[in-house]
Amino acid sequence: MTKNATNHLVLMGVAGSGKTTVAQLLVHRLGWSYAEADEFHPKANIDKMAGGTPLTDEDRWPWLRAIRAWLDAAEAAGRNAVITCSALKRSYRDVLAGPNHDATFVHLAGSAELIAERLSRRQGHFMPASLLPSQFETLEDLGADENGIVVDISGTPEEIADEIMERLHLR
C-alpha cells in the first residue's frame, strides 16, 4: 500500500472481470468509501457504449478527471476509498494515480474466454459483450513502476478478495 495517511484502491480490468463484486466484498470487510466509475460517465458516454461504440480517449478524459476528483475528496476527508474503473491504459492510470500517486491498482485479470462467459450471464448493464475484444486490445499491463498488483480471477470472489487483502496487508 501507499505511505499516505489514506489508501485508495482502484479495481481495474476489462468489463466482466468482477470489479464490482470484489469491490463490494472489500468495502464490506474494510468499511471504506466506495464508488463505481460508471457513475461518473456522462450520459453521452453511456449511450455511445450501449450502442456498441467504444469510447475514445477524448470521451474518457473528463470521466477520469471526475473519478480522480472523487478520490481527492475522499483524501481531503481522511477516508480510505475503493473505486472500480477499467483503467485500461497507463495514461488513464496516471490520471487516476494523482499527483501524490496515492492510488493502488488491483488488476483483476483473466482469460478472454472466462470473461466472455461471465459477460454472457450478466444482466442489466449498458456495456455489451461485443465491446470486450476492443477492451482487451486497449488493455496495457501494469508497469513495474506503477503501484499495483495483478490478481487472477479464476477463483471465487471471496478468494480474490482474500488474496487482495493478504497481498496488500489490509485489515
Image (cartoon, rainbow, N blue to C red):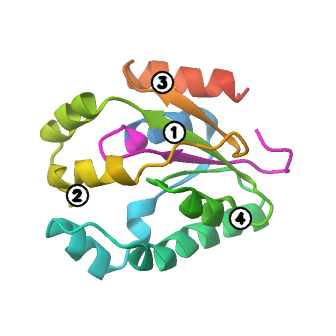
- Image position of 26 (left or right of 75): left
- Image position of 150 (left or right of 88): right
How far apart are the alpha carbons under marks 4 and 1?
18 Å
- Image position of 79 (left or right of 89): right
Q: For mark 3, what is the residue?
A: 160
The residue positioned 85% from the left and 50% from the top of the image is 5
Q: Main secondary structure of the magenta part?
A: loop
Q: Are marks 4 and 1 in contact (CB under 8 Å)?
A: no
Q: Amino acid at mark 3?
A: Ile
Q: Secondary structure at mark 1?
A: strand
Q: Amino acid at mark 4?
A: Gly
Query: Which circle marks residue 127 in the picture?
Result: 2
Q: Which contiguous range is marked in magenta?
A: 1-20
Q: Percent position (x, y) of residue 120?
A: 13, 39
**Which residue is nearer to you in this view: 118 or 139?**
139
Tell me if residue 15 is in the magenta stretch.
yes
**In the image, residue 165 above or below residue 72:** above
- Upstream in the sequence, badge 3 or badge 2? 2
- Upstream in the sequence, badge 4 or badge 2? 4
Q: Secondary structure at mark 2?
A: loop
- Upstream in the sequence, badge 2 or badge 1? 1
Q: Amino acid at mark 1?
A: His
How far apart are the alpha carbons under marks 2 and 1?
19 Å
